Amino acid sequence: MSLRIRFWISFICSIPLVFFMVAMYTHIVDHTVIEWGTFFFTTIIMAFAGLPFLKSAWASFKNHNANMDTLVALGTGVAYVYSVYALFKGLPIYFESAGFIIMFVLLGQVFEERMRKNASQAVEKLLDLQAKSASVLRKGEFVDVALEDIVIDDLIKVKPGEKIAVDGVITEGKTSIDESMVTGESMPVSKSVGDTVIGSTINANGTITFKATKVGKDTMLAQIVDFVKKAQASHAPIQDVTDKISGIFVPVVVILAILTFMIWFVFLNSGATQAMIYAVSVLIIACPCALGLATPTALMVGTGRSAKMGVLIKNGTVLQELQMIETVVFDKTGTITLGKPKVTDVVGDEQEVLELAAALEVSSEHPLAKAILTYAEDKGVTAGPLKNFEAVEGQGVKGHYGGQGVFLGNRRLHEGREFSEDFKAQMQDLQNQAKTVVILAKENQVIGLIAIQDVPKATSKRAIQALEARRLKTVMLTGDNERVAQAIADEVGIDQVIAEVLPQEKADRIKDLQKNSKVAFVGDGINDAPALSLADVGLAMGAGTDIAIESGGVVLIQNDLLGVVKAYDMSKKTFNRILLNLFWASIYNLIGIPIAAGLFVALGVTLNPELAGLAMAMSSLSVLISSLLLNRSKLPKI
């Protein structure tokens, strides 16, 4: 039986219980009818709405354990069984206490279930915004094709105002695209040939043709929904603490309830009925439902809101770790910088230098290779075949061209080769301009230099300043030359530079930094995967490689460093809300239990079981509302 059906059974049956309570004081109905009427409707509540509590409590008891349902089962069970006994003995009955308690507990659980569903559906509804069809090139002409029939490498035409069906790369045309539904960025993004497009975003003003690269469950939108579902189903380490507290708390409350009964009945001579009322009130008001809701509800809302901001947090553990970070380490290329380097200078015989360099870089997968090949193509330089190509990790590439050995890379690759003072001076000058310089040699003689520059992203400096305003240390970790790295670092405001690091050494540098602080690493490449996995928190740029995204605990969809600040702020805000929820749940119990036990009866302050049940439900509701308010809480300005 579903939770909602159980609640409505208890709610409907509670209506006549209210009537009988009023009738008892107004004497409009015979007393016998009231007693048997409350017995009948409470029995229905216990049999249908309350039975799962009893089953859960019994299962926990058999496993030598106790849970929140134990308190509800004990409180309602004691009230019901006593009232059945009292019914036949002519004593005061308290059936309505058991009925109302179950109804109020279920009310709190219904609110919880609804909030969970709303938090999950808020992100899942994005899938409903997908285009239902697209104009796909089939047999030489564009025809309408259903979304599910689109396959990878299909060419798709999108007119102004239409939705982009799936993820892909533009092959023709240029436009502006509204990506706010996925990235949270309100301004349309300019796109042209070679740029990626995201499924379900809206084409603003130009007609484009793009090639489908990801369809179905592989699209970014589908992955976002999957990310958020998994994150909302996970739990933060602090949840383990609250679970342990609940495990200890329940037996303690049962002992307190027994002591309450014994003190009132044995030492204060209040009578069995009154002593039982105090004991049941203690059991009900102490039910730590609010304690159990404090963490998961805040986690659900926090990860959902983060996703809408373009920050995907994989699970609760990552969210808890992120707010404790003290040092943020950044890769340079594609993370701090645009990752689209361009050749700015060629030193030496330009024709020969470009011909040899292009021959070497045709087989290379290094980010700088594309810049050299593009520049050579623009200059009309074509390269002949290269033999014995070999990539030297962290240094460069080499091979044989025209029967001679040729080498292209950094200083490490050229140790021992002849390097003129003129070349050295020009190389230093170019590096001082924040340009990466690759050296070309033929046999043992350096014959040329190629300067390549990759500028910082427009938001990098603002993001670094925002992190430092939050008292976080910033570090650049790169394989690039120290002068170039330092120039970029100075431009954006990075605190520390660790340069000329080989890919396999990045993880070691992260270990070194972790000796003194908790470390987050931000990267986007294949060589960043070990560092992303090893760091306390790995943040992968959304435009990075699949392996980098898989290794990171956080994915930044917008592909800029402002996402790091948003992730940190949202983590901090969510964790603080968890602590606030735990505080209120604990304070509620600390105040409520003494009142329920009758410690303030001399002051006229008492709490019967019905009110205890209502108060317990309201405490759970207050925690739910507190978590939901995360959606409206203000984040620090960036």
Image (cartoon, grey):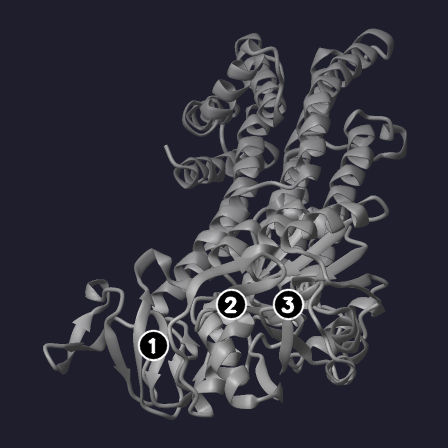
Residue topped by disc 3: 563
Q: Nearer the viewer, residue 204 or 601?
A: 204
Which three-letter amino acid code belongs to the residue tagged 1? Answer: Ile
Is residue 333 positioned above or below 425 on the image? above
Q: Which mark is residue 624?
A: none
**What is the residue that sits farthest to the left in this orientation?**
139
How far from the left and from the top, in percent, is residue 388? 44, 60
Quarter of the picture holding the C terminus: bottom right
Task: Give whichever of discs 2 and 1 has the lower sequence position.
Answer: 1
- Cα gap from disc 2 to disc 1, whole angstroms: 18 Å
Which three-letter amino acid code belongs to the residue tagged 2? Answer: Ala
Residue topped by disc 2: 543
Q: Is residue 393 left or right of residue 123?
A: right
Place residue 343 in its image quadrant. Answer: bottom right
Q: Nearer the viewer, residue 313 or 47?
A: 313
Q: Nearer the viewer, residue 450 or 478?
A: 450
Give the residue displayed 79% in from the left and 32% down from the top: 606
Q: Which marked residue is nearer to the observer: mark 2 or mark 1?
A: 2
Task: Give whichever of discs 3 and 2 has the lower sequence position.
Answer: 2
Q: How many marks?
A: 3
Task: Give the crowd class for mark 1: few <14, some 14-19, many >=20 residues within 10 Å.
Answer: many
Residue topped by disc 1: 164
Q: Secondary structure at mark 2?
A: loop
Is there a contact, CB below 8 Å, between mark 3 and mark 2? no
Give the residue displayed 72% in from the left and 75% down from the top: 419
Place residue 145 in its image quadrant. Answer: bottom left
Note whether residue 633 is visible.
no
Q: Secondary structure at mark 3?
A: helix
How far from the left and from the top, in percent, is residue 159? 29, 88
